[in-house]
Amino acid sequence: MSLSISPQIGIHQQYARIGIDADLGQFQISQSPASLEISTTPAKHDYHTEGGKLTIDNSAWRDALGNGPHLEVMNRIYSKSQSIALQGIAKIVEDGNRMAAIHTKENAIAALAADSTKDIDFREYMYMGDAAYDNIDLNYEPARVIRDIQPAQVHINVTRNAPEIQYNRGKLDIYMQQHASVEFTPPQIDYKI
C-alpha cells in the first residue's frame, strides 16, 4: 500500500472593510424683515375769495317817481314847453272864438267856467320818466375763487436687513472597520505510520 501524502495548505483571506460615518451639514438662515420709515407731508389748500359784486341801478325808477337827475328833468320840461305853449294859445283862441260866437245863443262864459274844471289835466306837465316793470337794473358779478393746491407727498425709506447665514459643518469619520488579513493554515501531518 502506497501512501501518497500531498500536504494541503489552507488559506483564509479577509478583505478590509472601511466604515464611513457622515452627517450632513446644516444651514441656519435668518433675516429680520426690512424696516420701513414712511413720512407724509400733508396736502396744502389755500383758497382766496374776492366777494361778489352786486350793482343796483335804480335811476330809471327814481326818474319815474319824479326824483330823477335835475338836468334831465329840466331838459324834459324845456323840450315840452314849446308844445305846451302852443296848446295854451290854441285853447285861448278856441275859448275866444266861443265867446265871440254870440249867434249860438250860448252862455259861453258859464260854459267855459264849467269846462275849465273838467279839462284840468296835468299830464302835459308831467316831467317824470316812463314807469315800467324793469326800471331797476341789476348786475351781479360772481365772486372769483383763487385756489392754490399743493398735493401731499409720501416719503418712503426702506432699510434692508442682510440675512444672517450660519453653517454648521457635518462630520465625516472614515475608519477601518476591519483590517485585511490572510491566514495560512498548514496541513496536519500525521506522523504515525
Image (cartoon, grey):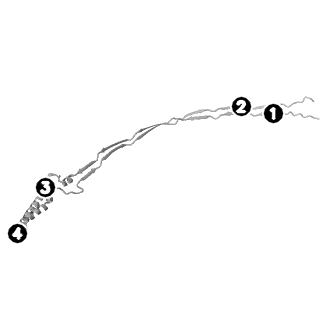
Where residue 41 sits in the image (x, y, percent)? 40, 39
Whether residue 12 appears in this view of the structure is: yes
Residue at 70% across, 31% down: 175
Q: Which SS class for mark 3?
A: helix
Q: What is the C-alpha distance between the residues marked 2 and 1?
A: 23 Å
In the picture, the disc for residue 176 is 2
Q: What is the C-alpha distance between the residues marked 4 and 3?
A: 43 Å
Q: Amino acid at mark 2?
A: Met
Tell me which numbered mark, 2 or 4, is placed earlier along the sequence: 4
Q: Amino acid at mark 3?
A: Asn
> Mark 4 packing: few (<14 Cα in 10 Å), some, or many (20+)?
few
Tell me if 34 is positioned left or right of 108 in this view. right
In the picture, the disc for residue 102 is 4
**Residue closest to the eye, 108 or 60:** 108
Residue position marked by numbered label 1 in the rendering: 11
- Residue ranking furthest to the top: 191
Q: What is the C-alpha distance between the residues marked 1 and 3?
A: 162 Å
Where residue 58 sits in the image (x, y, percent)? 22, 52
Where residue 124 sits in the image (x, y, percent)? 14, 59
Q: What is the C-alpha distance between the residues marked 2 and 3?
A: 142 Å
Residue position marked by numbered label 3 in the rendering: 75
Tell me which numbered mark, 1 or 3, is placed earlier along the sequence: 1
Whether residue 119 appears in this view of the structure is: no
Tell me if 188 is positioned left or right of 70 in this view. right
Q: What is the magenta range?
A: 72-78
Q: What is the C-alpha distance between the residues marked 4 and 1?
A: 197 Å
Q: What is the C-alpha distance between the residues marked 2 and 4?
A: 179 Å
